[in-house]
Amino acid sequence: MEQSTSHPAVRSFIRFAGHPFKFSLYLLWKLPIAWLAGVRLQQLEEQQCTIVVPFKWLSQNPFRSTYFACLAMAAEMSTGLMAMMYVRAAAPKRVSMLVTGMEASFTKKATGKTWFTCQDGAAIQAAIARTAASGEPEVLTVNSIGKSQDGTVIASFAITWSFKGKA
């Protein structure tokens, strides 16, 4: 995999994810519960990704806040989209990806939109590049921080990914 940030597969994935209609259809097809809950891509760049989850009827819990599972979906997606992007760029080497762990800390009730941002794109890219080059598995834990509109931290997640070369 090229270490250059201008890899054509990376640019292509960013264009695809940034297309509201195409990406919405992708979510509906591959992650229908996230689509129904209103989890949406806010921004995807080479080194960071931001996903937003609303507080609404389909994402609520009985305590008048966003259900923790919806928060977890958004946090995981903020890390997973960058992983998917760099797995694509690893071609022709095939690399599989799987969440193998998650740790969460909730500090405030989510009573409005929550934006989850992961800024670990460089670490994700490097782990996938190592797997593609060596064929050896890589395990990487990345962070996603969820904030309210005013910047208050709502929750933080540590998502552990496993990347493996496929034959």
Image (spheres, helix red, strand yellow):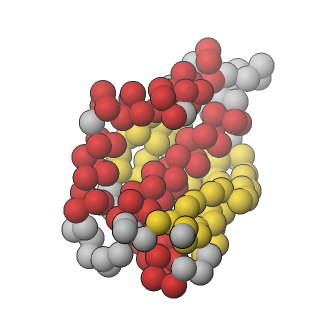
Across and down, in percent, residue 57 comes to 61, 15
Q: Quadrant of residue 100?
A: bottom right
The residue sitting at the right extreme is 62
Residue 31 or residue 132, whichever sits in front = 132
Q: Is residue 53 visible?
A: no
Q: Point out residue 20 in the picture as x, y percentages from the top left corner.
A: 30, 31
Choose top left, top right, bottom left or bottom right for residue 24: top left
> In which quadrant will I find the C terminus?
bottom right
Q: Quadrant of residue 140?
A: bottom right
Could one spot residue 139 in this view of the protein? yes
Q: Residue at x 54, y 33 (%)?
A: 31
Of 100 and 66, nearer the camera is: 100
Residue shown at the point (40%, 63%) measured from the top left: 86
Outermost residue toward the top?
Answer: 57
Q: Where does the image place residue 89, in percent across and percent down from the top left? A: 35, 65
- Number of numbered callouts drawn: 0
What residue lies at 36% left-to-right and 35% top-to-bottom? 23
2 versus 19 height, above or below: below
> Is 105 on the left or on the right of 111, as rendered?
right
Q: Is residue 108 above or below residue 67?
A: below
